[in-house]
Image (cartoon, coloured by chain):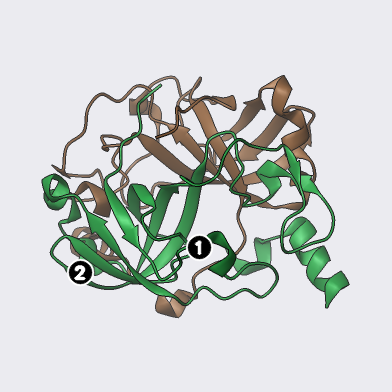
Chain colours: A green, B brown
Amino acid sequence: MFTPQPIGFVSSPYKEASQVPKGLGAKHEAEGTLMILPDLELGLTDIEGFSHLIVLWEFDRSGGFELLGTPPADNRPHGVFATRSPRRPNPIGFTVVELLRRDGLKLHVRGVDMLDGTPVLDIKPYLSNIPAEKLRRGWLAEAEARLK
Amino acid sequence: MFTPQPIGFVSSPYKEASQVPKGLGAKHEAEGTLMILPDLELGLTDIEGFSHLIVLWEFDRSGGFELLGTPPADNRPHGVFATRSPRRPNPIGFTVVELLRRDGLKLHVRGVDMLDGTPVLDIKPYLSNIPAEKLRRGWLAEAEARLK
């Protein structure tokens, strides 16, 4: 397979995992910056037109993986592919952020849930939603109902 | 960084890139299967409860990257991070699929746009939408208006 390399790094208010809001109703309103590597600046052309970006990044402070784990949003275990756990076979994180503004190589964004210094793997435009009436949220919806 | 390894492979009706619907108004209604590796079966626990899944996968038949390229949806070039081009610094693809049913290690899904045999890197539950009134789609919305 390919060899991952950072395209940039996250500047975030969160220095350690315990500071990141987690669990039911957690809000991700924190502002931060995606600092892109100078060689890649051309790749940002026209990104300003998108309100939201998909950010793929490395869980670089997470070791190993577990197939079954109990997420912060529940008190029951679920399979890793049914959660957003950091302890995944491929430690790739996924976050949708709002693009506030671009300043050259810096993308100022809202909604970071990554730790400061996290390596960014990719950025893609967020293009469309799943119709709300078609979306089912499995154990998460059940946990919300049960734990409320 | 980490060393990517497949968690499974896509079984898709598309054998080559030219067969995948592309460009403005392209619909991804094709059905396919995500075949997960036997060692990872426990990681699928409770995945049936989600209607939609995020699939991260490797563009394994794409070589190198280009920072500026003209996507099928437009006749003007845009930065790679403002497109879904396969020719990316880290060749990671992103697709949201609808989970039709699970059959042990096989996830039957709708909405595949990957080639047959594509390595899967990760699966995550699709949890929420960006409010439609907050979504801006940059050059893509402009191209739609211009090329219609």
> Residue type at mark 2?
Arg
Mark nearer the viewer, 2 or 1: 2
Q: Is residue A128 above or below residue B90?
A: below
Chain letter for the residue marked with disc 1 in the picture: A
Report how far apart the C-alphas of labels 2 and 1 lie in the structure: 24 Å
Chain letter for the residue marked with disc 2 in the picture: A
Left or right, residue B10 beside residue A6: right
Q: Nearer the viewer, residue B75 or A102?
A: A102
Q: Which residue is mark 2?
A: A102
Q: Earlier in the sequence, mark 2 or mark 1?
A: 2
| Residue B127: percent from left, percent from top | 62, 61
| Residue A2: percent from left, percent from top | 36, 25
Image quadrant occupied by the N terminus of chain B: top left
Q: Which residue is mark 1?
A: A129
| Residue A125: percent from left, percent from top | 34, 57
Q: Nearer the viewer, residue B121 or B100?
A: B121
Q: Residue furthest right?
A: A146
Q: Residue at x 42, y 48 (%)?
A: A57
| Residue A80: percent from left, percent from top | 69, 43
> Residue type at mark 1?
Asn
The answer to whether residue A105 is visible is yes
The answer to whether residue A20 is visible is no
Per the image, label 2 sits on a secondary structure element best described as strand
Q: Residue at x 44, y 32 (%)?
A: B2
